[in-house]
Amino acid sequence: MTSRSRKIHARVAIPLALLLLQACSPTRPPVEDLAAASRGLASARAAGASTYAAAEYRSAGLRFEQAQAAEAHKDYDAATQLARESAADSELAAAKTRAGKAREAVDKLRQDNANMDRDLTEHASAEAQP
Amino acid sequence: MTRRLIAGLALTLGFAAAGDAFARDDEYQRLADRFDRLAADPALGQRAPAQMDRARAALAEFKEAGRGDRKQLVHLVERRIDIAQATAQAESLESQRADLQRENDRLQLAIARRDAAQARAELERQRLQSQIRAEEAESARRDAEAARAEGEQAAQAAEAARSEADQAKRMAAAQAKATALAKKEAELEAAVSGNAPKPKPAAAKPKPKAKPKQDAAGG
């Protein structure tokens, strides 16, 4: 190996080694991500997500538990990722819950209005009869 | 030798990167198409602007991300698009609910007005009935009063007639008595004067029999 090729290897190997070192270095525990996921889950539960968006709510809970387990194993990257996914699932569950409640209200109002409209129409036609 | 090795490595890396880029673009294109369909939806596309922006930003981040990051981002990008869609649906439904609620208020008002009009009409009907009953009662009372007054007048008239009849009877009796007395007087006068016609035996009072003289002398 010539001195030139040694220089080239050194230029490639050193940054690669540094990158690998950085990639393998332990990150900090995702405290804020886990807290946000926990808040999202609580908020979705309070909104009634277990009724209106059961699948998303279950997924959020499962990912949160997995995030906690990953954090316990000091796998902070996985814990961060799972916590963020849990938060997104909770947010989706809350949005679907909001939509589900609005849909229920729309259906009820539509029915009520139809009944009242019919009541008014029948009364008006009854009055119109001699 | 080394140069060839490096060139081969670079070529391999280049092909791998190109293949990875094509795969990444497929994934990105799939997500971008989902987002574009949502954005073009006439009912939902203009709603939930904040969530749409977040989905758009997540999509852009996904596009720029490296291969390793993309694996982590794909779920989040999917979720951001889902959240934007669900939020837009919720807003659309809430808008419908607001419209229906306004319609509901209008119908409730119409029914309340109708019920109030019915109640007023019923009240007026009852008032008229009550007035009619009161007028009928007053009329009956007046009729009764008139009948009672008429009865009293009739009784008074009857009493007056009875009294008049008694009076006439008494007058007739007095007249008859006066006539009888006048007749008797005339008879008496005639008897006193002697030329008067003898009273009819039937009319004359029976005289007491004269006592025998014997009895009068002897006695």
Image (tube, coloured by chain):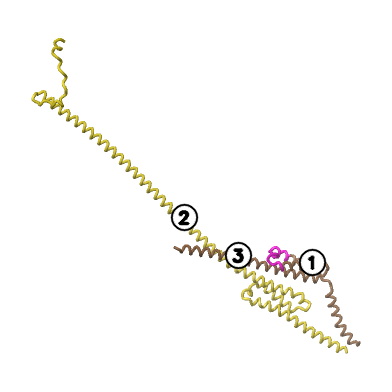
Chain colours: A brown, B yellow
- What crowding class fits label 2: few (fewer than 14 Cα within 10 Å), some (14-19), or many (20 or more)? few
Determine whether the residue tagged by mark 2 lies in a helix, strand or loop: helix
Name the disc covering residue B123, or none: 2
Q: Residue at x 75, y 70 (%)?
A: A85
Q: Answer yes or no: are tags 1 and 2 on the same subunit.
A: no
Q: Chain of mark 1?
A: A
The rendered magenta stretch, by its main secondary structure, is classed as helix
Q: Which chain is mark 3 on?
A: A
Say what secondary structure mark 1 lies in. Answer: helix
Residue A1 placement: quadrant: bottom right
Q: Quadrant of the C terminus of chain B?
A: top left
Which disc is residue B162 wearing? none
Q: CA distance from mark 1 to mark 3?
A: 41 Å
Residue A47 falls within the magenta-colored stretch: yes
Q: Which mark is residue A68?
A: 1
> Residue A40 location, x and y as percent?
72, 66
- Looking at the rendered structure, the number of numbered marks drawn on it comes to 3
Residue placed most toward the observer, B93 or B199: B199
Residue position marked by numbered label 3 in the rendering: A108
